Image (spheres, rainbow, N blue to C red):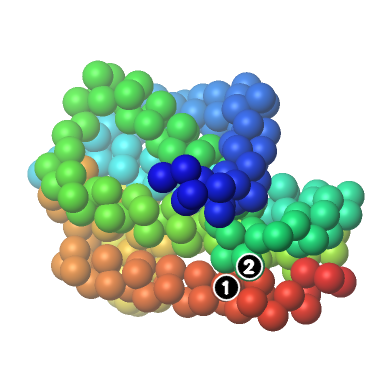
Amino acid sequence: MTDLLERHRGLIALSGRESVRVLKLWTQTIAAPMLSSMLFILVFGVSLGGRIREVGGVDYEVFIVPGLITMAMAQAAYSNNSSSVFQARSDRYLHDVLAAPMRGWEVNLGLSMGGVVRALAIGAGLLAIAAPVTGVPVRHPFVLLLATVLVLVLFASLGVIVGIYAQTWDQAGFVNNIVILPLSFLGGVFYSVDLLASPWQEVSHVNPIFYLINAVRYGFLGTSDVPVLVALGVTAALTAGIVAWSASIFRSGRQLKD
């Protein structure tokens, strides 16, 4: 065990630095996103709950919880890593990390850990608050665990990629504001896609975040707009593609030295 820790002490140090960075600023990195998501649950649950009693046999205030947790975790993992890596490049700190005796996959994983820690803290906090308030169940823990891991890996890796390629802060925030957030809202966070008329129902199935939300929702509620294996399969394929892209950057190292 000691030898293993010694061989990967660079990875441990980098992971610890990224995690501590998140925890030191917990009011901004964890508390603020949790508050925003809880306001969504309260506002939409109260305002629309009186009009939309149930969706697919599930109380509306319960139905929206899995989607909001997914959206909050995805945004947190992406935003943290894109900003952290972009800042590391701007300050030339990333060059020091690359000069350390660490393998490419270790640097990649270490830079990703801050987003993972932040997303897990937000997701766990939201669940701890929402469970007693809404009574949201966890029907399939294994599916929920697998879907959560896929969401974390996907958006943490995407954040690292964008942080490496971005040339300005606006570019680093573009993907979250123009891609992730709109696709999350249109992916069935607040409604079942099955209720949409054609062609909007078919269009929704092109949205990759639709499958993420439904995979997590099945883990919580045991219900999904698509078969759970399809939701997990699409999510896994997308995650594998993003991870392969991220790994190729650190394997070649060309973009990292710009």
Left or right, residue 30 beside residue 212: right
- Residue position marked by numbered label 2 in the rendering: 104
Residue farthest to the front?
3
What SS does tag 1 mark? helix
Q: Which numbered dot is residue 18?
A: none
Give the answer, above or below, for where 177 lies relative to 244: above
Whole-percent x and y of residue 56? 14, 49
Whole-percent x and y of residue 231? 27, 66
Which of the two discs, 2 and 1, sits closer to the camera? 2
| Position of the C terminus by quadrant | bottom right
Whole-percent x and y of residue 181? 55, 53
Q: Amino acid at mark 1?
A: Ala
Q: Is residue 174 visible?
A: no
**Tags 2 and 1 touching, CB below 8 Å:** yes
As measured in the structure, the alpha-carbon distance from the residue carrying label 2 to the one carrying label 1 is 8 Å
User: Dot 2: within a 10 Å radius of its alpha carbon, few (fewer than 14), some, or many (20 or more) residues?
Assistant: some
Residue at 46% x, 32% y: name it.
121
Give the answer, above or below, for where 84 lies relative to 204: above
Q: Which corner quadrant of the image does residue 65 belong to? A: top left
Q: Is residue 223 visible?
A: yes
Left or right, residue 111 beside residue 134: right
- Residue position marked by numbered label 1 in the rendering: 247
Give the answer, above or below, for where 177 lies relative to 209: above
Q: Amino acid at mark 2?
A: Gly
Residue at 60% x, 27% y: name it.
23
Q: Nearer the viewer, residue 85 or 144?
A: 85
| Position of the N terminus by quadrant | top left
